[in-house]
Image: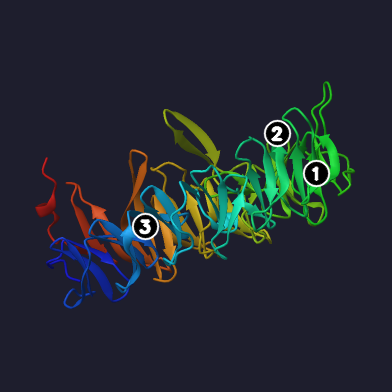
Amino acid sequence: MPFDNPFGNVIAANGKNTVFAGLNDVWNLVSADGKTMLKANVGDTLSLLTPNRFGFGRDGKIGIMDAEGNEVQPATFDDAYAGGDGEFIVYRVGDQLGILTATGLKITDARFDVVRSSGSAAERGMLIAASGSDGRNWIIDLNTHEVQPADFDLPLTMIDGHLVVRGVKSSGVGLADRKGKLVIDHKYVSLGDPSGGLISFQEDYASPCGYLDYEGKVVIEPKFSQCLPFGQKDALAKELSTEGRIGKFGPIDRSGEWLAPPSYDYAALPALSEYGFSRLEKGFLSIGKRTGEQGLYSTDEGKEIVPMTHRLFRVISADWFIFSEMSSPMITIPYGDTRDFQPAIGVMDKHGKRLIEPSSSVLIHLDASGKFFQTSTGLSLKSKAGLHDLNGKSIVPQEWTRLKVDLDAGVIKGYEVEAQGVERIEHLRALYDLEGKPLLKIRTTACGAHQVLNGAGKPIWPKNHRNYCPKH
């Protein structure tokens, strides 16, 4: 569509040959070149909810339509917004909330006061929690559309087919199965990550930890100061400290007996989330010395598989590891008015081949598509994200705050993120193909005007940006 067009705003519809275009206070579906009106007045307001599903306004109410302008839900809602990572839609009628699938099909009537799903529902087995005015809690399965009563709050991460859950009227935690049925009552102050058929437990904060099976039976009596998840063969647990001696970690069998004398000063969950929090990657645990060197232990094989010679060593998956050498550079990370220092990290494969050298990144994870490593210089809005393929080749340099891979459209999108109060506003600034070839870039000129450049860096519009410099 040329920039010289009569429309006040445009939104890509199917990403191929149609767009929604605003004209005279209504939205219309038009051809991508703007020459053909396909459907007039599809709504007086329009917003993207989930992929290929849009909220449209008509006579003060909200409905759902697809990218071809077909109504999926009539305009009878008072509001509608995306939930999770675009995995479902929440709609409001009056002061009550209901749930639709990501494609707009109804799962529940509007019957809830609150619908909870912070972050990805996929991490919780596609289960979300909701509560009504009567105080009852419900678990909704986005896959089967089952709605079940529950006496716990929002489920935590789904691991090994189970969810660690927190009680509604107590601060204790328990365990629920895949369908949201409570299998271990929430009477413990702490439960670990379920793995290998067992889960660690602690009855109060001052007591030692032990292990339960998934039915709540005590399999290993509480006798350790720290209990890490089991793999196929063993787990690492920390012995209780005695006067004048700090306990160490060592391998235990499923009866709680030591398989070898405790010798590790440090052991922890082996992987890092995209936000830098430790998480479980089944079959591995991070190990280390008091002097700071780290390595890797396999709880599936029951042995140390990477020696403790690295400044940092973590797991991305069974095929790729994060590492930092003692000689790797330290990166300055601003935290408000203070600064922290983190080691630069890189990536090696399971054979030890170095794919990405430690240089400027402090966080690395697989992107949502699983096709790329996404790197980051930090967690603030000033941090920059980059993209490498799975062989370590740089695809997109660390230039933008956030990168999103759209495999369906065959593009990588680069965004600058702006803070507006508690909101985070994403501004699209660049497009690349999946090989990293620049397709489009929006630059901010010295005078503050925006200018669209093609893949070769030549201006598309406006040709003379000075006519669009902000007037102060």
Q: How crowded is mark 1: few (under 14 residues within 10 Å), some or many (20 or more)?
A: many
Q: Which mark is residue 211?
A: 1
Disc 2 designates what residue? Answer: 291
Quarter of the N terminus within the rendering: bottom left
Question: How far across and down, in percent of the image, does residue 7 sit?
Answer: 15, 65
Q: Mark 3 points at which residue?
A: 414
Q: Gap in Å between the C-alphas at discs 2 and 3?
A: 40 Å
| Left or right relative to 256: residue 50 | left
Label count reads 3
Q: Nearer the viewer, mark 2 or mark 3?
A: 3
Distance from disc 2 to disc 1, alpha carbons, whole Å, reads 30 Å
Circle 1 — which element? Answer: strand
Say which amino acid is labelled 2: Thr
Q: What residue type is labelled 1?
A: Tyr
Nearer to the camera, 106 or 40 = 106
Question: Disc 1 to disc 3, how far (Cα)?
Answer: 45 Å
- Mark 2: give few (<14), some (14-19) or many (20+) Cα within 10 Å: few
Residue type at the position of mark 3 = Gly
Q: What element carries label 2?
A: loop
Decide: is 239 above or below 132. above
Residue 160, percent across and down?
70, 56
Q: Where is residue 322 in the image (x, y as percent from the top left)?
A: 61, 51
User: Which label lies toward us, 2 or 1?
Assistant: 1
Position above or below: 411 against 262: below
Could you say which quadrant of the image residue 211 lies in? top right
Cβ atoms at labels 1 and 3 below 8 Å apart: no
Q: Is the Cβ of the residue at disc 2 closer than 8 Å to that at disc 1?
A: no
* 142 sits to left or right of 195: left
Estimate the x, y position of residue 13 in percent, counting from the top left: 30, 69
Q: Is mark 3 on a helix, strand or loop?
A: strand
In this rendered view, identify the residue nearer to me: 30 or 46: 46
* Apparent side of residue 294 relative to residue 411 in the rendered image (left or right): right
